[in-house]
Image (cartoon, rainbow, N blue to C red):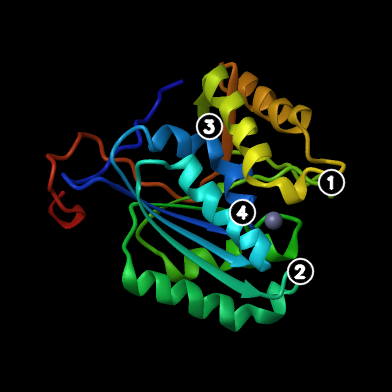
Amino acid sequence: MLSLPLSAPSAEPLSVLTIGAHPDDIEIGAGGLLLGLAESELRARYVVLTGTAERQQEARNAARSFMPAADLTVDLFDLPEGRLPVAWGSVKEILEGVARSCSPDVIIAPSSDDAHQDHRTIGELVPTVFRDQLYLAYEIPKWDGDMSRPSMYVPLSASTAHRKVELLHKCFPSQRDRDWWDEDVFLGLARLRGMECRARYAEAFRCAKSVIVPSAPTLGTSREEI
Ligand SMILES: [Zn+2]
């Protein structure tokens, strides 16, 4: 299996846009990836569409905990949880507003295949607003049993996988009583995805479209010049 490095296409730091329907989505789906990206210079925009004041505070803390040294911008909204399909216009306007003010290299967001209506709404809208980015759609284990076939894997070391779970517990105390919120679920899925890519642990993503350049462009070369 050939590994493709995820690095900035220019001399600027890698720019990442993370989007969640609910506080904790981003960290459950891509916390390990964020911990890895944050080891290098990183510009991150962190957007969550729903959340009470308590949960928004958790999201704020989590964004900083998972990306401690990043140049970080956090945007939190309070659209109605569980009802994003009927707030379709507001979701689209928020995403369009984000698109006007930042041009990320990578987008980490829910999948259009997700069984949760809020996740799915965002997953359906992201590619209609952002058309020139690598879009990695994360997966979130849930009662609905909607795990699908990923197309990209991010191997995680044991220490990163355990650090992710430790931070999930620490950053989202309001979720600890949920029957599905436990280390076995998070590490079990990571171990399964790790087995699929010959690593101990991994996070997996769906990527509907990617562009491969046969030879590495010189730093600063725009896509039009390739
Ligand atoms: Zn969610």
Q: CA distance from mark 3 to mark 1?
A: 27 Å
In the picture shown, does residue 98 fall above or below 196? below
Q: Is residue 181 left or right of residue 99?
A: right
In the picture shown, does residue 138 fall above or below 111? above
Q: Which residue is mark 1?
A: 178
Mark positioned earlier in the residue sequence (2 or 4): 4
Q: Residue at x 57, y 18 (%)?
A: 158
Q: Which residue is mark 2?
A: 82
Note whether residue 22 is visible: no
Mark 3 and ligand 1: say if the CB distance to the nearest ligand atom is below 8 Å.
no
Ligand 1 occupies quarter: bottom right
Mark positioned earlier in the residue sequence (1 or 4): 4
Q: Which residue is mark 3?
A: 153
Which amino acid lies under the numbered mark 2 shown in the image of this protein? Answer: Gly
Residue 8 on image: x %, y %: 26, 43
Q: Residue at x 35, y 45 (%)?
A: 70
Q: Is residue 144 left or right of residue 198?
A: right
Which amino acid lies under the numbered mark 3 shown in the image of this protein? Answer: Tyr
Residue 140 on image: x %, y %: 69, 45
- Mark 3–mark 2 contact, CB under 8 Å? no
3 vs 2, front mark = 2
Q: Which residue is mark 4?
A: 58
Residue 14 on image: x %, y %: 30, 45
Q: Nearer the viewer, residue 148 or 41?
A: 41
Q: At numbered mark 2, what does the secondary structure look like: helix, strand or loop?
A: loop
1 vs 4, front mark = 4
4 vs 3, front mark = 4
Q: CA distance from mark 2 to mark 1?
A: 17 Å
Q: Residue at x 30, y 38 (%)?
A: 7
- Mark 4–mark 3 contact, CB under 8 Å? no
